[in-house]
């Protein structure tokens, strides 16, 4: 029997997140394991009059690529991928893995080389998104591998994923419109601010957001959503931060990451596990040692760490920082082949200050107009 939440999610992604209209060209990208959701999204997009491109791949292809590719192949960028990014109106990514650790043992230098080579594609994507010419959203298909990472049964993980997206509501679209309103109050407040300071265990970090734009993430980009973010002034980041949860990137898990910033740049990077990988990513290119994003998680339906950044960065009462590429629409100018989100939990004694004013303590906003648990 088909899970009705899949059809609800497909409708939300195509109608609310992407707002597809007749004549739009939409690319749906996903792993074969996510076929049930791909099918429903394909059906929903056609019903809205869109022209649909489906790119379905196999989880194992990336593993084969990094095992077999020579230097030229690692750095090759498909002209067809470039053309597609330049011409589609919307992009829908559906993420799923049969094995989330498949790339763990790949030489980090090969991963870095391939990521750096695809920097031009990242720039096209971000520039077109910032200009409003490309609408995009990405979501997670609840699969066994991710359920195992989260230490849940598949049924528990399905309930977690759909609950995080409010798909248990009679009308999830109306629920996300309500959430959007609450988050906009916080966004409007932050758009008048100049500086953010984070204080937590082994953490005292500040950055300027003067002249930068804060974005209300209300289900139109990642889904499930629930954050507000900006692009810090590149050379303003100062201080140190200890990230509360393991930072996961390309199957590599890096534990107890500690970063020290001086004039915006990572001056010191330490980790209890995966330190060599961490430093290799930071040295990937000229922009990978700077912050491209500073954000506040506001989805209080997400309460636990799951080793999946899509959910972990949204946990209500956390903040996250991303090394590498920034989003052009925020005003951030940092460019890199890297974009790596890392999460710091403020729910146990953490404090968030804006222009010297304490606005959040222990993960809860002091202003009742802002998102609440």
Image (tube, rainbow, N blue to C red):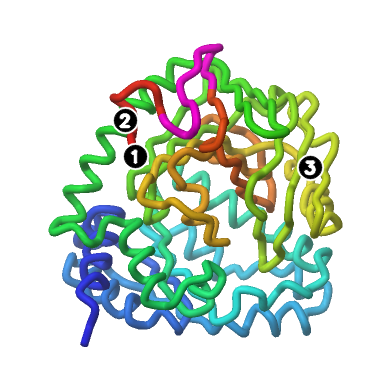
Quadrant of image for the C terminus: top left
Quadrant of image for the N terminus: bottom left
Q: Which label sits on residue 234?
A: none
**Residue named by callout 3:** 286
Residue 327 falls in image quadrant: top right
The reply, left or right, for residue 125 in relation to residue 369 is: right
Element on which disc 3 rests? loop
Q: Residue at x 47, y 25 (%)?
A: 360
Which residue is nearer to you in this view: 368 or 327? Answer: 368
Is residue 368 shown left or right of residue 284?
left
Majority secondary structure in the magenta region: strand
Q: Is residue 132 above or below residue 110?
A: above
Q: Which residue is mark 1?
A: 373
Q: Position of residue 29 (x, y in %)?
A: 44, 71
- Sequence order check: which comes first, mark 1 or mark 2? 2
Q: Between disc 3 and disc 1, whose residue precedes?
A: 3
Residue 130 point in image, percent of width and height: 45, 41
Task: For marks 3 and 2, give the one nearer the viewer.
Answer: 2
Q: Residues within 10 Å of mark 1 (few under 14, many from 20)?
A: few
Which residues make up the magenta segment?
A: 353-364
């Amino acid at each position: 029997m088909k899970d009705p939440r899949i059809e609800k999610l497909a409708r939300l992604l195509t109608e609310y997140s992407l707002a597809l209209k007749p004549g739009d060209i939409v690319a749906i990208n996903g792993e074969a394991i996510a076929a049930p959701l791909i099918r429903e999204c394909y059906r929903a997009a056609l019903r809205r009059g869109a022209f649909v491109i489906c790119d379905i791949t196999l989880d194992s292809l990336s593993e084969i690529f990094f095992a077999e590719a020579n230097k030229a192949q690692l750095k090759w960028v498909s002209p067809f991928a470039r053309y597609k990014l330049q011409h589609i109106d919307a992009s829908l990514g559906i993420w799923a893995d049969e094995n989330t650790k498949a790339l763990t043992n790949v030489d980090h230098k090969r991963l870095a080389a391939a990521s750096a080579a695809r920097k031009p594609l990242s720039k096209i994507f971000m520039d077109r998104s910032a200009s409003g010419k490309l609408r995009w959203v990405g979501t997670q298909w609840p699969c066994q591998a991710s359920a195992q990472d989260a230490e849940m049964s598949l049924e528990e993980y399905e309930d977690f994923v759909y609950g995080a997206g409010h798909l248990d509501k009679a009308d999830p679209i109306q629920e996300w419109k309500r959430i959007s309103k609450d988050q906009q109050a916080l966004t409007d407040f932050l758009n008048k601010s100049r500086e953010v300071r984070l204080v937590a265990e082994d953490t005292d970090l500040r950055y300027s957001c003067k002249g930068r734009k804060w974005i209300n993430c209300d289900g139109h980009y990642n889904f499930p959503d629930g954050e507000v973010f900006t692009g810090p002034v590149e050379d303003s980041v100062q201080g140190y931060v200890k990230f509360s949860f393991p930072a996961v990137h390309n199957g590599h898990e890096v534990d107890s990451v500690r970063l020290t910033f001086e004039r915006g740049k990572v001056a010191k990077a330490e980790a209890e596990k995966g330190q060599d990988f961490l430093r290799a990513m930071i040295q990937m290119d000229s922009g990978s040692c700077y912050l491209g994003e500073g954000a506040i998680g506001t989805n209080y339906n997400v309460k636990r760490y799951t080793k999946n950044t899509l959910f972990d960065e949204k946990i209500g009462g956390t903040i996250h920082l991303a090394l590498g590429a920034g989003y052009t629409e925020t005003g951030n100018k940092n460019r890199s082949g890297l974009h790596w989100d890392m999460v710091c939990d403020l729910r146990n004694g953490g404090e968030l200050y804006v222009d010297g004013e304490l606005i959040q303590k222990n993960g809860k906003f002091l202003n009742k107009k802002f998102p609440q648990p």
